[in-house]
Image (cartoon, rainbow, N blue to C red):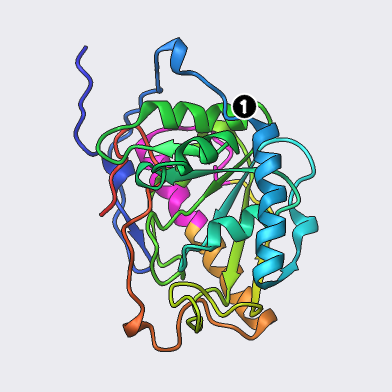
């Protein structure tokens, strides 16, 4: 049987005012890859990356971490992080209580960063097609009881969880791992004087962890319709956490004058078998 490679309903964006519902009940095909490609990212490497992140993030800025105790101490977990600045990933990697494997676009793995990022257990995503190797590695991280880091908006933007890709739901439903919402606030409020692309040195950045929750409805379904419904449930949970984090910290997620913030190249969306592309 030939597999339909066209983009399915699980690959569409779900925005805050979306009312569409998928009608297809076909199951999402399971991922397969060549056995030699099934290399689980190193948890020991990710722990080294976490320690490096601790030194860099606390050395350059003043992270204020709230609710880290909510993150499960053991077992698989998915960190769903809002994304408005390049330092959001390294910041969460450094302040999270457990080593984290983030999905990172292939374009970031250049020169010496390639072996470095792979060495600290990060997952390289090729956005030019359905990167089954990255999908399998991410699922293997969760199957081994590790922590997977995802930017569910699929690209650096307003950081408000207003539009999510369906891949977060895919990984959560497929693995059964709980989702831990994480709000990073303050990373894009001001530009630094010395390095314009970074927050001011020694400025405060808030990282707020929320209560873990399950994405599925308990039915165990993995159909495209089930993934779309799960994505909408996830969006409500993440948006609610972000609003609570704003109230708690007195911050907003984006620049007060966001029109002058240059948007960089899109980071990889979290993938399903039907999509690894950004919009």
Q: Residue at x 50, y 84 (%)?
A: 193
- Say how many tags the image has: 1
- Residue 230 within the magenta-colored segment of the rendering: yes
Question: Which residue corresponds to the image point at 66% horizontal and 26% vertical from the top-left?
Answer: 144
Quarter of the image for residue 91 reads: bottom right
The stretch drawn in magenta includes residue 102:
no
Q: Which residues are magenta?
A: 215-234
Q: Position of residue 102 (x, y in %)?
A: 53, 45
Q: Is residue 28 above or below residue 89?
A: above
Q: Is residue 158 left or right of residue 102?
A: left
Residue located beneath label 1 in the image: 143
**In this view, 167 is above or below 204:** above
- Residue 279, picture quadrant: bottom left
List x then y, in percent, for residue 90: 58, 56
Q: Nearer the viewer, residue 248 or 129?
A: 129
Residue at 66% across / 78% down in the picture? 202
Q: Residues within 10 Å of mark 1 (few under 14, many from 20)?
A: some
Residue at the (63%, 30%) spot, across then down: 42
Q: Is residue 273 left or right of residue 181?
A: left
Which image quadrant: the N terminus? top left
Q: Is residue 146 visible?
A: no
User: In the depicted view, which residue is nearer to us: 4 or 41?
Assistant: 41
Relative side of 106 to 170, left or right: left
**Residue 72 visible at all:** yes
In this rendered view, identify the residue nearer to me: 21 or 181. Answer: 181
Q: Position of residue 38 (x, y in %)?
A: 49, 18
Work out whether residue 214 or residue 111 is closer to the camera in this orientation and state it. Answer: 111
Q: Secondary structure at mark 1?
A: helix
């Amino acid at each position: 049987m030939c597999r339909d490679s066209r983009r399915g309903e699980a690959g569409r964006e779900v925005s805050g005012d979306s009312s569409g519902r998928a009608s297809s009940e076909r199951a999402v095909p399971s991922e397969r890859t060549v056995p030699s490609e099934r290399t689980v990212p190193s948890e020991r490497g990710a722990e080294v990356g976490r320690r490096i992140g601790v030194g860099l993030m606390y050395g350059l800025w003043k992270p204020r971490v709230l609710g880290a105790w909510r993150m499960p101490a053991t077992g698989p977990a998915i960190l769903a992080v809002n994304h408005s600045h390049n330092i959001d990933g390294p910041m969460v990697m450094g302040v999270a209580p457990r080593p984290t494997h983030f999905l990172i676009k292939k374009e970031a793995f250049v020169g010496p960063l390639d072996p470095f990022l792979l060495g600290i257990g990060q997952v390289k995503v090729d956005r030019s097609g359905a990167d089954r190797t990255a999908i399998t590695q991410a699922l293997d991280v969760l199957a081994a009881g590790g922590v997977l880091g995802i930017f569910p908006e699929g690209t650096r933007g307003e950081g408000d969880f207003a539009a999510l890709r369906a891949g977060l739901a895919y990984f959560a439903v497929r693995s059964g791992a709980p989702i831990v919402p994480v709000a990073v606030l303050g990373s894009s409020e001001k530009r630094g004087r010395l390095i314009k692309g970074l927050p001011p040195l020694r400025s405060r950045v808030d990282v707020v962890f929320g209560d873990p929750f399950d994405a599925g409805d308990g039915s165990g379904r993995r159909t495209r319709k089930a993934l779309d419904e799960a994505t909408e449930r996830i969006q409500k949970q993440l948006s609610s956490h972000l609003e609570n984090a704003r109230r708690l910290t007195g911050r907003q997620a984006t620049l007060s004058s966001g029109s002058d913030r240059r948007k960089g190249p899109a980071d990889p969306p979290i993938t399903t078998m039907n999509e690894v592309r950004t919009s």
